[in-house]
Image: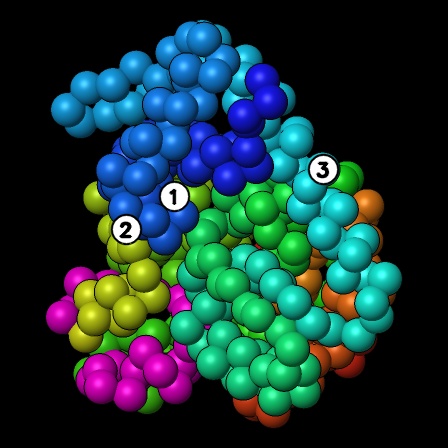
Amino acid sequence: MRNLTFKQFRYFEALARHGHFGRAADACSITQPALSMQIKALEEELGAALFERNRRQVRLTSFGAEIALRIRNILWSLDDMEGYARASRGGLAGKLRIGVIPTIAPYLLPSIIADLTRLHDGLDLHVREALTPKLVHELNEGRLDMAIVALPVSEPSLAESALFTEDFVLVRPHKDEGKPIPNREALRKMRLLLLEEGHCFRDQALSFCNKNVHAAQPRDWLDATSLSTLVQMVEAGLGVTLIPEMAVAVETRSASVSVARFTKPQPSRTIGMVWRRTSPLTRQLTQITEVVRNSAAALRPYGKTPTSQAPTSLR
């Protein structure tokens, strides 16, 4: 097995993850024929098929699944070695893989990327947008260095650093401008538009307005895949929604809706950064938390440091 290469391992891992030659090739920035050739060479070297192939899907064989576990451990160790090499050089330079949840990415990323590249011109930023469970999984597998999410994540393997808290606001049709702000009891009786299941923001919103989520009638809840869609649905008169304050300027600038703040207790969330406790880049990542915190502070009024005001618990 002298002809095995780390490049083949990375191609194998991408194909196992995506289950599709075209998507895996795009992720690896190579052509599909080149990827196929490397996978075939790997199978020939190992002497057994790693994937079952059909027109629509590629899936691991039982042998391939066993090999996948070993290859992921090898790649994790390689990435860990690269991390130690970067840490030994000191400062912030080289590849930095950042994960961000969708209810943060469009609003904070431009400022964060601009500040990080301005302060550390040696950084090669790679950004991944996904839901929290996916980001946590990729952090634990060593495919991400850090992630910006809503806290707490409560994953024993990850360190958490709170960055700031922000309130949620009520978005309702423009015709409701000036009406009394509903409390959480009144909000339960309204048609509430929410993000689809899997978004932590959905759970936070439901926690504020309805403690017994499962008691709600299905027709009372309409799901969307983005905050932008939620606001457009409100403008169309389909109901009301909650959005984080950081999203207001972007999502309501072209929508005819009314935005109102709740009276106390206000629903809110804490935004923070997480990374593996064993990461050799811990010192550098701690420095990055300060850059991200300052980037968010520059976009006030929504950002409040976690110690300035305790948020209403939504979890």
Looking at the rendered image, the disc whose residue lies closer to the viewer, 2 or 3, is 3
> In the drawing, what numbered circle is on residue 223?
2
- Location of the N terminus by quadrant is top right
Front-most of 22 and 296? 22
- Of callouts 3 and 1, which one flags the residue occurring earlier in the amino acid sequence? 3
Please count the marks in the image: 3
Disc 1 residue type (three-letter): Glu
Disc 3 residue type (three-letter): Ser
The residue segment tinted magenta is: 236-264
Q: CA distance from mark 3 to mark 1?
A: 34 Å
Q: Quadrant of residue 233?
A: bottom left
Q: Quadrant of residue 238?
A: bottom left
Q: Quadrant of residue 248?
A: bottom left
Disc 2 residue type (three-letter): Asp
Return the residue at label 3: 77
For numbered disc 3, what is the local secondary structure?
helix
Left or right: where does residue 304 sit relative to residue 105? right
Front-most of 34 and 162? 34
Front-most of 139 and 168? 139
Looking at the rendered image, the disc whose residue lies closer to the viewer, 3 or 1, is 3
